[in-house]
Every structure is written in C-alpha cells, then in structure tokens.
Image: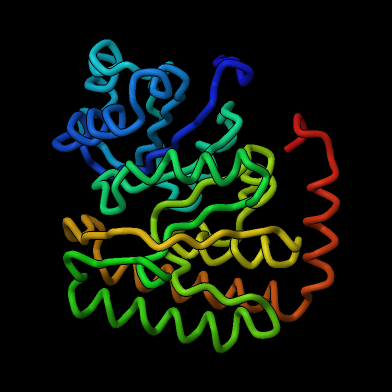
Amino acid sequence: MVSMSKTGLSLIIPTYNEEGIIEKALSEIALSLGPELANKTQVIIVDDGSDGLNNLVPLLSKKIGFQSLEVLRNSPPLGKGASIALGFKGAQGDVVGFMDVDLSTPPRYIPKAMEMLNSGGADVFIASRRGAGASVNRTQSLTKDFLGRLLSVLAHGIAFVGMRHYSDTQCGFKFFKNRTAKVLYKDLIAKDGLADLEILLRANLLGMNVVEYGVEWSDLRESKRKLSRILAGEIISIVRILVTYKLAPSQQRKKLKDRSESPLKKL
C-alpha cells in the first residue's frame, strides 16, 4: 500500500473502455503536475468497461512517472459515482480528487485545487463551467446541454432550497481533503453521475467550505454510454436523492456528522 505520508495526491480516473486514449491522458496529467508532484501522486483508474486497459496500464506505469498506477475493474459495471467512491476507499494522498479521462477540464488546475485545500481555505474544490472566470471552448450537444440545464433547474428549485446553490454541480473535476472525500462518498444513494449532486448536498448539510472555481472546459467527445440508459438511471437517482435528503434532512445530517466524527479507519 502507498504510504500517505509520502503521497501528496491521490487521483481517481473513472473510465469506460478508454484503452485508446489512456496513455495520452496520463502523460498530459504527469506533464501538468511536473516530476516532483507526479512522483508523489497515486493514480487509481476505476474501469467500468471490458477492453484491454488491465493489460496496458502495467506497461504505462513503467513509462510515466507516478508514485503508483493501478486499475480497478468493476464486474458488473458500478456506474461513475460508485466507481469514484471505490477509488476513494483506497486513496492515500493528503489531497484526493477525480477528473474525467478526456481531460475536458485541463489537468493544469490540479495544483490550484491542491493549493486551496492545503491552505486550509477549503474542504472541497469543484470546477465550474459557469462560474466566474470560466470559459467553454466547445459546447455539449443540444441534448446533453438541455438535460444539464434541466438538472440545474431541479437542483436549484428543489434539491438546494434553503441551502447554498452552485453554478455547476456536474463538472467532472472535484478535489477534497482525504477524510472529507471518505465521508462524502461513503454509502452513496446515487451510483451514477448524480453522485456529484448528492455529495454537494452532503457537504451543505455538514457546513463544509466548498470552493467553486471557474475553469476552461471543452466537450471533447460524446459519452460511450447510451443516453437512454444514462437518463433512466439519473431519473431514478434524483427521485431517491430528493426523497432521502428533503424529507428527512435532520436525520441525514446526524448520520453524516456521526460518520465525520468516527475514526478514519472505519470509513
């Protein structure tokens, strides 16, 4: 196991049949981190697919200078949110986070996230495509954009009523203090992309300091997952989230506070 005392960063990368782009992505991440930080970085790829990633990554670990590089393969697939949660269980870094493998949010923002978390100014760092200073170089398809805006309306109009709102809950680039991630991602209701929404609801309930940072963002490719399957899963997830967190918020707050006060080894 990687020693936390020597690991500055644990980076989780959820994938789905990404054999064709993984080497380029990992190389760009290492270049952005620089040799010193890359050598203190634990990379955990959590894969929901069935390609040759398992065989390729051990070869890449000898070429790219991370402290460690491993693949966890889900069988059957777990969904993006559950994959990230699984990765965080084994994360040893002082700062932990995840980003999309297509690098739609460039990895050059990782040091900024680490700086803000290590300075004590934030518990959670989330990238935003709509926050101050953000720029979108290539927009999503009309369907994805419509669904994203619909989710935003539901989130602001129902899920976050009486709480802090966020300009962008779904950007796939979020970083945390290690313990914070283990608390927020334990026993998720949402196993898919709506885990992003759920963990921000949890952070609000716990009164955590969430920093939303505007980033440069490009939609570099369409998802390989079927849109109909994504949509069906997210409808179920948002209903479950609303029922759980809006009907009994005090109960959820107590459960989260108890968890946050428990020893780290139990999380």
Residue 99 or residue 116, whichever sits in front: 116
Q: Residue furthest left?
A: 20
Residue 71 or residue 145, whichever sits in front: 145
- Quarter of the image holding residue 16? top left
Residue 207 horizontal/vertical position (percent): 75, 63
Look at the picture and state if 66 lies above or below 212.
above
Residue beneath the point at 61% across and 31% down: 94
Look at the picture and state if 60 lies above or below 112.
above
Number of residue marks = 0
Residue 103 in the figure: left or right of residue 202: left
Residue beneath the point at 33% across and 48% down: 100
Q: Quadrant of the N terminus?
A: top right
Residue 113 horizontal/vertical position (percent): 49, 45
Residue beneath the point at 80% across and 48% down: 259
Q: Quadrant of the C terminus?
A: top right
Look at the picture and state if 97 lies above or below 250.
above
Residue 116 horizontal/vertical position (percent): 56, 46
Residue 90 horizontal/vertical position (percent): 57, 29
Residue 255 in the figure: left or right of residue 171: right
Residue 32 or residue 199, whichever sits in front: 32
Residue beneath the point at 61% across and 21% down: 4
Residue 75 or residue 133, whichever sits in front: 133
- Quarter of the image holding residue 246? bottom right
Look at the picture and state if 223 lies above or below 75.
below
